[in-house]
Amino acid sequence: MEYVKIKNADRIVKDCPYVVNNPKTYKGKWNQFFQNGNPICLELGMGRGDFIIEMARKYPNINFIGLEAVDSQMVPAVQHLRNEKLANLKLICGDAMEIDQIFQKEIDTIYLTFCDPWPKKHDDKKRFTHINYLKKYDKVFKKQKHIILKTDNKGFFAYSLETLSNYWYTFKRVSLDLHHDENPISNVMTNYEKQYFKEGRPIYYVDARFEE
Ligand SMILES: C[S@@+](CC[C@H](N)C(=O)[O-])C[C@H]1O[C@@H](n2cnc3c(N)ncnc32)[C@H](O)[C@@H]1O
């Protein structure tokens, strides 16, 4: 997908104190990096960062990392964070394909929020719930695996339920309309989600776990 390019985005992102510019250095050492033993949660494809910033504000005893491939996409997050002091938040500009080079058995939860659905069959390997990605997640999760996925795309949701269950994940909670669920689910909205919510589109949600 093409995103709007922002002038000097690379420098703006690099200079932000929340951005970790050499993340591979901390592989296996992220709890040391945060200087605490708190859980670490990772959002892949955080975009403008609305979700991960709000989660970090709301849950100070959890460490949050937002990863995003496109520097221009991260600029609004960098701007929002100018007047914030959140010791439990870090951002990484990088490709989700490389997460196993950045983390090792230290992530508690992965959030997949409105990721690109890649509807064409020949693009299936790019979907964040393709088996190749699920195998990568195995390398970064601590013992328990925990994925929370939200999307507006029915086809991608159905595909993800299938790949996750074929990979022995079980579903603690599934909703076909997150914002109108009979039993409300605690939720922080992403930027895309805010737009879809305004438009009245249903949001699909799954809390998937693999517990040994
Ligand atoms: C549709 S947007 C959703 C953004 C945000 N999660 C939200 O819900 O508002 C998908 C984001 O994923 C990012 N992305 C796509 N492929 C990626 C990859 N391989 N690694 C990291 N980010 C990626 C895109 O640049 C884009 O910002």
Image: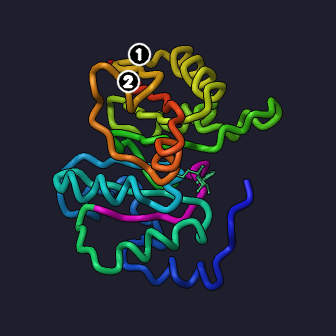
Left-right relation of 192 to 107 = right
Residue 111 visible within the image: yes
Which one is in front, 60 or 192? 192
Q: Earlier in the sequence, mark 1 or mark 2?
A: 1
Which residue appears at 48% of the width and 35% of the height?
150
Residue furthest out toward the front:
199
Q: Tell me where residue 182 sits by quadrant.
A: top left
Residue 127 in percent (x, y) is at 65, 37
Q: Pick the quarter of the image with the C terminus.
A: top left
Q: Residues within 10 Å of mark 2 (few under 14, many from 20)?
A: many
Instruction: Give residue 192's position: percent from left, percent from top.
Output: 52, 49
Q: At 34% across and 19% down in the image, what residue appears?
A: 172
Which mark, residue 131? Answer: none
Label 1 neighbourhood size at 10 Å, few (<14), some (14-19), many (20+)?
Answer: some
Label 1 and label 2: CA atoms lie apart by 5 Å
Look at the image and give the residue range highlighted in magenta: 89-99
Q: Which residue is mark 1?
A: 170
User: Is disc 1 placed on a helix, strand or loop?
Assistant: strand
Residue at mark 1: C-beta within 8 A of ligand 1: no
Q: Which residue is mark 2?
A: 209
On screen, residue 88 versus residue 106, left or right, reads: left
User: Where's residue 63, x and y in %?
Assistant: 27, 54
Residue at the spot x=54%, y=35% of the render?
201
Give the residue type that dot 2 points to. Arg
The answer to whether mark 1 and mark 2 are in CB contact below 8 A is yes
Q: Is residue 92 magenta?
A: yes
- Element type at mark 2: strand
